[in-house]
Image (tube, rainbow, N blue to C red):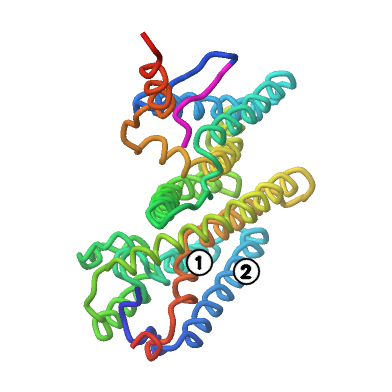
Amino acid sequence: MINRRSYLGIPLGTRRNRGWLVAAYWFSVVVTLAFGSVFLYRGRFTMAHWWISATLGGLIGTMFIFLGGSRQIGPLVDFDGDPTPPSPWIPLVAADNIVRRLKNDAEENRIDRSLDERDIRLRNAAHFEAYQVVRRILVPAAFVMFVVSDTILRNRRFIFLPISLLMTLVIYNLPQSLILWWEPDVEELQ
Amino acid sequence: MNTTFELLGKRINLAPRSHRRMFVVVIYAGFAVWIMGILSGARYFGLFSGILCVVCLLALAAVAGTGYEGGDEREVHRRDHVFFVAHRQLSWVLVLLLFTSWFRGPNPISAAVSPPVRALLEQLPFAVLFALVALYATLPQAILLWTEPDMEDMEAEQVAPRTSSRPG
């Protein structure tokens, strides 16, 4: 499933490195969303507020594609087996440079491959496991949090968006994280 | 997957795909009523819609199971593929949830519209959230029911040899 040898300078051959990549990714997601929610709550709607909001938006947009699985960006192959390169249209201006770097990095380190039977089985199994986690833990937890935040907390207007974002990122990127975590070392595979 | 479903003593044949698709539509109509019942705030309608939601969940589980059942390798492969498809489809609902959750934060649109529309926009994220919960609980089974080809009625098959073997 992994379509490149290294990603942003991190060699992807070993499971340990991929574990660190996944851990760093989720750490940055939580930090960004926590900062974003505090900033949103205390914001005063100045020009700087909107610029920082746009930057945060770009950063969060990048987080959706960072681990791959879609549109040939990131360390994993496209889950639909689409061999076409990503569109040059980039929706988020703030994420432009990061996405460009990811694309260049991808072209240098790309291992040409499409989904074989093992990949499809791994992809489906990862989605099945992720679905179980989300269905049994995340959706009920988010549901309770939304209801609690909407009835008890004073800043309820500001908590819906960060929790929605976190839930979306977890649902969207959990299968990718599981695959990066599960894949054995390259030496073991060979 | 069961090919028959009994409702109030009446046996419904779910072997043809068209019947199963109709069944899925009815189940999701029930969930839509549940969401409306919760958001309406009316006590009796909310209670009725809650009961309807539980009935829909039970009916779906009775026909298609929980979705986690394994089996031989082919069945496990089919099950995992259904979960993959369901996961991808739900991405669109999540995008919708993100978009609508924007209305609960500070935004220029809410300030510009009339109070009833503003109240509706503030309720909208909850409607999508409830829809997400319902879909997450049921979408794999629904996809299975929707996509499986026409099946022969297993019970009819079992009954036919018995009746044909009866003497004159």
| Outermost residue, right side | A152
Q: Magenta segment, which residues?
A: B1-7
Image quadrant of residue A100? bottom left
At 41% across and 40% down in the image, what residue appears?
B143
As helix, strand or loop, the secondary structure at mark 1 comes to helix
Which residue is disc 2 drawn over? A35
Q: In terms of depth relative to the viewer, which is nearer, A165 or B159?
A: B159
Q: Chain of mark 2?
A: A
Q: In terms of depth relative to the viewer, which is nearer, A165 or A4?
A: A4
Quarter of the picture containing the C terminus of chain B is top left
Q: Residue A10: which numbered mark, if any?
A: none
Residue contact at pointers 1 and 2, CB within 8 angstroms = yes
User: Is B116 left or right of B150, judged from the image as shown?
Assistant: right
Q: In terms of depth relative to the viewer, which is nearer, B126 or B9?
A: B9
Q: Which comes before the other along the chain, label 1 or label 2?
A: 2
Circle 1 Cα neighbour tier, 10 Å, few/some/many (<14 / 14–19 / ≥20): some
Residue B89: x %, y % from top left: 41, 47
Amino acid at pointer 2: Phe
As helix, strand or loop, the secondary structure at mark 2 comes to helix
Which residue is disc 1 drawn over? A56
